Amino acid sequence: MPGYPERPMEPGSDLKTALLSVQALLSAPEPDDPQDAVVAQQYLRDYQTFVGTARYWTEAFAMISSLGVEEKVQKLVEMGFPEALVRSTLESVGGDENLALEKLCST
């Protein structure tokens, strides 16, 4: 059929292609052909600020926050759960205290 590949695509190949594209954009930014013109200008004109902003966004939105983890651990340990189990459960649910409690109660 016109417009379709001659052989069937492998399952997940579209996802693989998308992830490879994202990886390429992240590893080799193209400020002359940007996805975001403001960020591209910052990259070109004030690289240190660009790096600082990128670091902030990564820490704020792409990493599990360690802020408050000890308080969550303490609360769950006070409920009678072993500390090692509490820590591993919190990690497995991305630090969500409520999900951790549900998981701890169901085991």
Image (cartoon, helix red, strand yellow):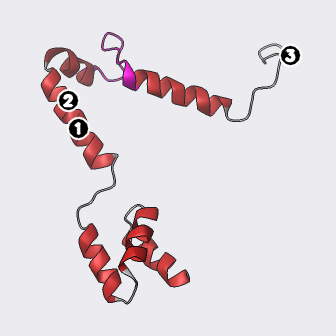
Label ID, residue 51: 2
Answer left or right for 45 relative to 93.
left
Query: N-terminal of the two: label 3 or label 2?
Result: 3
Q: Name the residue beneath numbered marker 3.
A: 1
Badge 3 amino acid: Met
| Quarter where residue 37 is shown | top left
Q: Secondary structure at mark 1?
A: helix
* 94 lies above or below 107: above
Report the number of numbered marks: 3
Residues marked 3 and 2 touching at CB (< 8 Å) = no
Label 1 vs label 3, nearer the camera: 1
Quadrant, the C terminus: bottom right
* Magenta part of the chain: 26-37
Q: Farthest residue toward the front?
A: 84
Badge 2 amino acid: Val
Label 3 vs label 2, nearer the camera: 2
| Quarter where residue 89 is shown | bottom left
* 85 lies above or below 9: below
Residue occupying image coordinates x 27% and y 80%: 74
On the image, the x and y values in percent for residue 30 come to 35, 14
Q: Secondary structure at mark 3?
A: loop
Quadrant, the N terminus: top right
Badge 1 amino acid: Arg
Residue occupying image coordinates x 33% and y 83%: 77
State the predominant SS element of the stretch in magenta: loop
Q: Name the residue beneath numbered marker 1.
A: 55
